[in-house]
């Protein structure tokens, strides 16, 4: 059986949006993964009840602000409430991330699910809906962050990090020939170390 190995072709064959876990028992929401194509499609996100985006890519950003203000002394610097609640982790897809950043990724994803915004006009996006975790291709960084989260929050279902990774690869419809680099091995190793640190942190909280 032949598998296309060009990364652009593989990315093009993936769904724009993949449902990874339905109704997480601790949070009651669906968890999705996508690449840049899905994360930038607001209509698609809304149809799937996504209200929160967690971007794992340092080399990718989105402008969800549709009604922007401008910084008065810096023309072109727009700001304002976005159409999505938006969190940024900013991982490199390979070596170069400090170990603490993978730990932070886990806690940022948890914060996206647990943070309660105040009932004030300056916090207009208070809806608590489904959550999207994305990176550029939806194949490596987003996969490992989601795997770490599932492994640590649902240990009875995903007893090992590898079990969570396999589940996500299948739900994301990643070509088996690409599994060796989706996600990158250096990210899997970092997530394994992060899991140990998180368990230590949680044991003394």
Image (cartoon, rainbow, N blue to C red):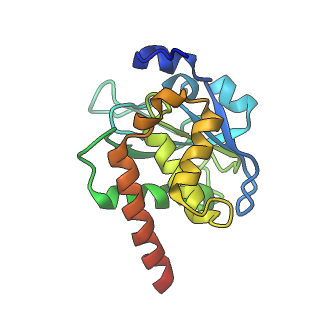
Report the front residue among 57 and 195: 195
Please say if 177 is above or below 196.
above
Report the front residue among 95 and 113: 95
Please say if 119 is above or below 172.
below
Residue farthest front in this picture: 1
The percent position of residue 125, horizontal first and vertical second, equals 63, 45
- Residue shown at 58% from the left, 22% from the top: 14
Give the left or right position of residue 176, taking residue 26 as reference: left
Residue farthest bottom in this picture: 204
The percent position of residue 107, horizontal first and vertical second, equals 48, 61
The percent position of residue 145, horizontal first and vertical second, equals 48, 49
Q: Tell me the quadrant of the picture where the N terminus can be found.
A: top right
The percent position of residue 91, horizontal first and vertical second, equals 35, 44
- Residue 104 visible to the viewer: yes
Report the front residue among 106 and 175: 175
- Residue shown at 71% from the left, 63% from the top: 26
Give the left or right position of residue 80, taking residue 90 as reference: right
């Amino acid at each position: 059986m032949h598998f296309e190995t060009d990364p652009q072709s593989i990315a093009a064959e993936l769904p724009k949006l993949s449902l990874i876990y339905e109704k997480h028992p601790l949070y009651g929401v669906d968890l999705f993964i996508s690449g840049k194509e899905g994360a930038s499609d607001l209509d698609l996100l809304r149809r799937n009840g996504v209200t929160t985006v967690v971007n794992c890519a340092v080399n990718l950003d989105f402008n969800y602000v549709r009604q922007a203000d401008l910084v008065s002394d810096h023309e072109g610097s727009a700001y304002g409430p976005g159409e999505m609640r938006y969190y940024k982790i900013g991982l490199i897809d390979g070596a170069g991330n400090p170990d603490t950043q993978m730990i932070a990724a886990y806690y940022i994803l948890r914060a996206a699910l647990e943070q309660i915004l105040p009932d004030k006009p300056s916090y207009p996006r208070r809806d608590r809906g489904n959550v999207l975790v994305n990176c550029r291709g939806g194949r490596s960084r987003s996969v490992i962050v989601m795997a770490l989260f599932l492994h640590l929050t649902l240990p009875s279902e995903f007893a090992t990090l590898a079990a969570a990774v396999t589940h996500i690869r299948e739900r994301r419809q990643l070509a088996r020939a690409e599994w060796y680099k989706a996600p990158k091995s250096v990210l899997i190793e970092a997530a394994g170390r992060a899991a140990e640190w998180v368990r230590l942190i949680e044991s003394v909280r």
